[in-house]
Image (spheres, rainbow, N blue to C red):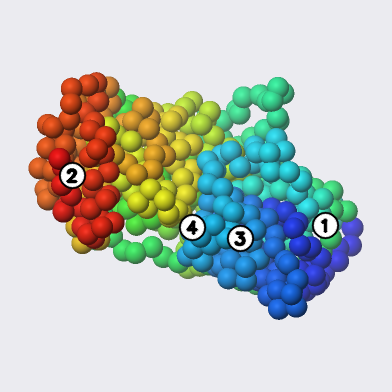
Amino acid sequence: MSYNYITAEEAASLIQNGQQIAFSGFTPAGATKVIPSAIAKRAEEEHAAGREFKINAVTGASTGDSCDGVLSRAQALNYRAPYQSNADLRAGANKNVIHFTDLHLSMMPQYMNYGFLGKFDWAIVEAADVSDNGEILLTTSVGISPTGLKLADKILIELNEYHSKELRGFHDIYECANPPFRREIPIYSAGDRIGSEVVKVDPKKIVGIVRTNKADEVKPFKPSDPITEKIGQNVANFLASEMKAGRIPSSFLPIQSGVGNIANAVLGAMGNNPDIPAFSMYSEVLQDSVINLIEEGRISCASATSLTVTPEKIQEIYANPKFFRERVVLRPQEISNSPEIARRIGIISINTAIEVDLSGNVNSSHIMGKNLMNGIGGSGDFTRAAYTSIYTTPSVAKGGCISAIVPNVSHCDHTEHSVNVVVSEYGVADLRCKTPYERAQILIENCAHPDYRDMLRKFIKDAPMGHTPQTLSNAYCFHEAFITQGDMRKAVID
């Protein structure tokens, strides 16, 4: 079939006010770039002419500034789900001028398939290649792209020549049937492949193709510092001790790791620990640190939905595609984040907390209980199903004015029943099978900053007798102190 090659502006002219679009992208990896920018410019022109122009947009997770950022600044977004990391989008969501829904990432494709989000007018995806018979080779992420391409009435493609066609063979495209016809997902180890190398669509749905040549907008994370390095060492030493105790098999278990500088520090420490053997990853995002460990032979295989690496690192991969094709698998996010697979293969999940309370509940998405930071992301997908779930956090923030260990979290994403282990730079709190009072004491003594330990001990000591140490009048005294005085250390426990 002969496709219609058009400009980004011509593509944007096809989008109508109020339409719903599924964009590719899981982090900036594989995110569309030039068409969203053209849509944003069109929105500004429509607004200047006094006409309403907003779209509903869903993606795999966050995207780059050329998608989330430009659309937010142009006031072109009415609705957005399921995750974000852009300052302009975050501001719009916290002001409720952008209607934002924070969702478990594994559920996004399912909700689309179930019809919970309604009709999809368009799928706009980035591709490395498109065949005449409708075979689409995705770029550095899969995310919700297969679902969006299937459900959308029409398709626009950014054919990005920056990305190598040697990506063919990296992807493993498999979609689940809807209940009651769903079967088990036949993945039993991180490297198993069960699907197709490409997404197959009716070529008649492809309305236009826009040629581009742009790198993913992936920036390097901040380098590790003494605190993140200590957290990484604490996690690695804990896992090594678990293996020595026989609670982790000698062959080790697959690792799921979140995104950011703490995650990089943890993986680096695991790679450097001589007591931890080479391991596999079954995660949602692969960062530069993962590629380094694959090259060093410390990670044997890595499965995810997104290759979120810097331009320099992606060129290393493109220079040696055969080596990485045998060791990297990119899947749809309902597969990469599937709790079914996580439970089956025994994933050890390692994610980052904003705050943890004395019961072991974790807040990973909101600041002071109300303002969205990024979202729950995929952490919940893995936490409930993990062999062992670990949360890491520096003990304090804002120069010590905020404690990560608090009497009660201001927003709860992961309950005490799902959180097994908490790690700060001060140590490890193993909460597994502990009573509420034991959990509180372990968190205070092993993870809390010394400046806050006496206050937290007083909260426990003064709590009326019950199964859980709790005083409702003091539950949020730390947060109130920060809001009113700028320092949690000024909290008064009555």
Drawn side of residue 251 relative to residue 433, left or right: right
Pointer 4: what residue? 94
Pointer 1: what residue? 206
Q: Marks 4 and 3: CB-CB under 8 Å? A: no
Mark earlier in primary sequence (1, 2)? 1
Mark earlier in primary sequence (1, 4)? 4
Residue 276 spot, x, y in % from top left: 29, 39
Residue 453 spot, x, y in % from top left: 12, 43
Residue drawn at x 43%, y 58% as measured from the top left: 288
Pointer 3: what residue? 31
Q: Marks 1 and 2: CB-CB under 8 Å? A: no
Secondary structure beneath label 2: loop
C-alpha distance separating marks 3 and 1: 18 Å
Q: Nearer the viewer, residue 256 or 391?
A: 391
Mark earlier in primary sequence (2, 4)? 4
The amino acid pointed to by label 3 is: Ala
Local crowd at mark 2 within 10 Å, few (<14), some, or many (≥20)? many
